[in-house]
Image: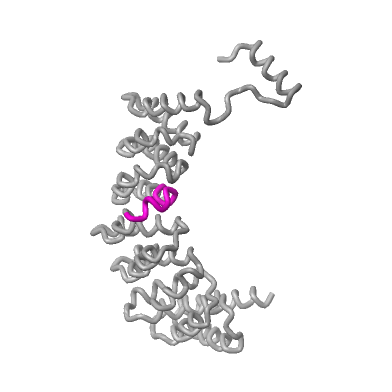
Amino acid sequence: MLNRNYLATSMLAVLITGTCIFPAPGTADEKTNVADLANQLQSDDLETRRNAAYQLAAIGEGASEAVPALTEALADRDDQVWFQAALAIARIGPPAHNATPQLVENLENYRDQRRYRAAYALGKIGPDAVPALLEALKHRSSQVREGAARALGWMTIDSEAVVDALVETLADSDDQVRYRAAEALAARGEACESALSHALSGQSQAARRAAAFALSQTRPVQDATIEALAEATQIDDVEVRGPSLVALAKSTVDRDRLVPMVVAALADSDPTLRESGMLALQKLGESSG
């Protein structure tokens, strides 16, 4: 603990010179603290491990030295230790790439929160985690595939390999996996619009539905996409027609062409399509305002 004379002298120095003489982040003192906390993560005492994980998460990117210990903590049975370790890894980001295999393993964890937080941490690690995530998109477990798609959705990487893998995942056998892939593609905006437009016109019903959903979450601007959406509003599949109509309402399509489509949806016997018609009408109002 700092003695009072030292504290008073330090405060006086700040007032007179505007200079702080306390150790700055990243100094030897902080590095020593990180090393100590990393060691404490190995303790047999639960509260010691919890406190160490919490403090490392608070330090964030400055705790990169603790990545090996934090990675081992992903095997801890205690949720508080595990959550804080995963958060610390996420905040450290790319320098924590060595934790990727353990995080991918946790995508199959039976606890929802562990799967979600593992995906988030993988997304924050970024490019170094991509090869493992692309492989995870082919995993036998739908939970792992969903987590991989979710993690890729938290990245801004628009490489051809990532986009192609996500487009392929639009035809996955599991609903949640498909829609996570759709969200990941939608988050990339125009970079993936062409791929989604192509999937919307493809042979796979599952891929068409997911592509329509993804396009309804972004703002289509390419003429080819607008035409694909207009054709999709005529398909006898509410899960394609509805989102396609909403996507069109957010696009630059001619309003005289769009209004009859909206009116038809509002008068349809299917409540889901009527709901899409209401949402499209709302989007029309917003654009005209």
Q: Is residue 173 above or below residue 15?
A: below
Query: What residue is shown at x 31% (from left), y 44% (from top)?
Result: 102
Q: Is residue 259 above or below residue 52?
A: below
Q: Foreground: 115 or 4?
A: 4
Where, by quadrant of the figure, is residue 168 drawn? bottom left
Instruction: Assess whether residue 123 is covered by the magenta stretch.
Output: yes
Query: What residue is shown at x 30% (from left), y 66% (from top)?
Result: 174
Q: Is residue 76 above or below residue 215?
A: above
209 sits to left or right of 135: right
Query: What residue is shown at x 31% (from left), y 60% (from top)?
Result: 137
Main structural element of the magenta stretch: helix, strand or loop? Answer: helix
From the image, which quarter does the N terminus lie in?
A: top right
Spot the residue most to the left: 140
> Which residues lie in the magenta part?
121-131
88 sits to left or right of 255: left
Give the number of callouts.
0
Where, by quadrant of the figure, is residue 82 drawn? top left
**Residue 220 placed where, x, y %?**
52, 75
Query: What residue is shown at x 28% (from left), y 68% (from top)?
Result: 173
- The colour scheme applied to this rendered structure is one colour
**Residue 163 placed where, x, y %?**
40, 66
Spot the residue most to the right: 16
Q: Foreground: 75 or 39?
A: 39
From the image, which quarter does the C terminus lie in?
A: bottom right
**Residue 52 placed where, x, y %?**
42, 29
**Residue 49 placed where, x, y %?**
38, 28
